[in-house]
Amino acid sequence: MKDEALRKNKKSCYLCEAMNSTLIAKVDKKPELENDFGILPENYLRFVYKCRDCSVYFNLHENIEDGFYAGAYNKAVYNHKLMDKYTEIINLPDEKSDNRQRVQRIVQFCDQMGWPYRNVKVLDIGSGLCVFLGVLKDFGFLCHCLDPDPIAVDHAVSNVKIKGYTGIIDDFEPEEKFDIVTLNKVLEHVNGPIGMLEKAKNILTNRGVVYVELPDGDSALKHGNAVEREEFFVEHLMVFNKDSLGYLSQKAGYKILKEESIHEPSDKFTIYAFLKPED
């Protein structure tokens, strides 16, 4: 009955709102490698669809509650032992570290733009463990973070020694603006990624860009399936590809300066892009 009710009440595409999608998978049991978010086995049910209009994949379910990222996510994933996990990950060698390779992409972009690192203000939204900013800071970047979880922000300020803000971008009104706003594996977790990107424009300098990373559904499906691949796990409301990234960028008022699909050391399939607001 729950199966029938959930599919009967199928919502429109989370990204473009079209009612034109294809069922990719029914998932009625937590995948072995998925984090335990406290969903009772008898309540675990979700459907993965792909929109025929914008090409985004989306997870239809009722398992993630509002306010989840204000504390429950970090508790489930890291048991709030952020410093222990931070130390473990930041000490990974370059070839095994998603974060260090991400930093290299930021460094190379700034080199191409002729931006001295010490003059570049970076805001990482949804900073979590803050490993990315911890590495970036060593290059001389002026690093800031915004996260809804006060424990994550306290960790960033106390341990990583950067400037941190607690909250979400909807309510964020900083006195300063930023040359680079980063959204690393964030937009797939939110209901309104277009709106989030639109709001990011308000905190960019005139030269500013947004750097995004998103799970790459197309590449993931070439190397597995929508049940077992991490890219499609329950916490990801949407999973992208180049077509849906193009739709997202255009609707939010950005042009894509650079994009690439990559296979990361952690085995994640990812699309990254540098986005510039349209004039």
Image: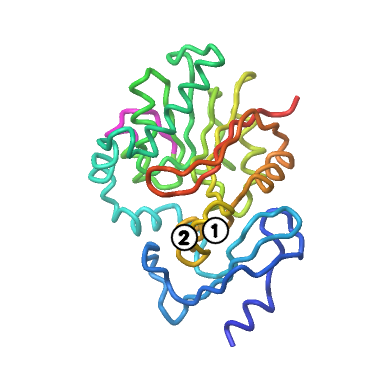
Q: Residue furthest bottom?
A: 1
- Magenta segment: does it hold 158? yes
- On screen, residue 57 versus residue 152, left or right, reads right
Q: Residue furthest front?
A: 222
Which callout, 1 or 2, points to the residue nearer the camera?
1
User: How busy is the neighbourhood of tag 1: few (under 14 within 10 Å), some, or many (20 plus)?
Assistant: some
Q: Which mark is residue 229?
A: 2
Nearer the observer, 200 or 183: 183
Q: Which residues are magenta?
A: 156-165
- Mark 1 or mark 2, earlier in chain: 1
Distance between mark 1 and mark 2 Cα atoms: 8 Å
- Inspect the image, locate mark 1, and give the three-letter code of the amino acid beneath it: Leu
Q: Which mark is residue 44?
A: none
What residue is rendered at 56% in x and 23% in y? 177
Residue 236, position as x, y percentages in the image: 52, 57
What residue is rendered at 52% in x and 39% in y? 183
Q: How is the image coloured?
A: rainbow
Residue, disc 1: 221
As drawn, 32 above or below 250: below
What residue is rendered at 44% in x and 16% in y? 117
Question: Could you tell me which quadrant the C terminus lies in?
Answer: top right
As drawn, 40 above or below 165: below
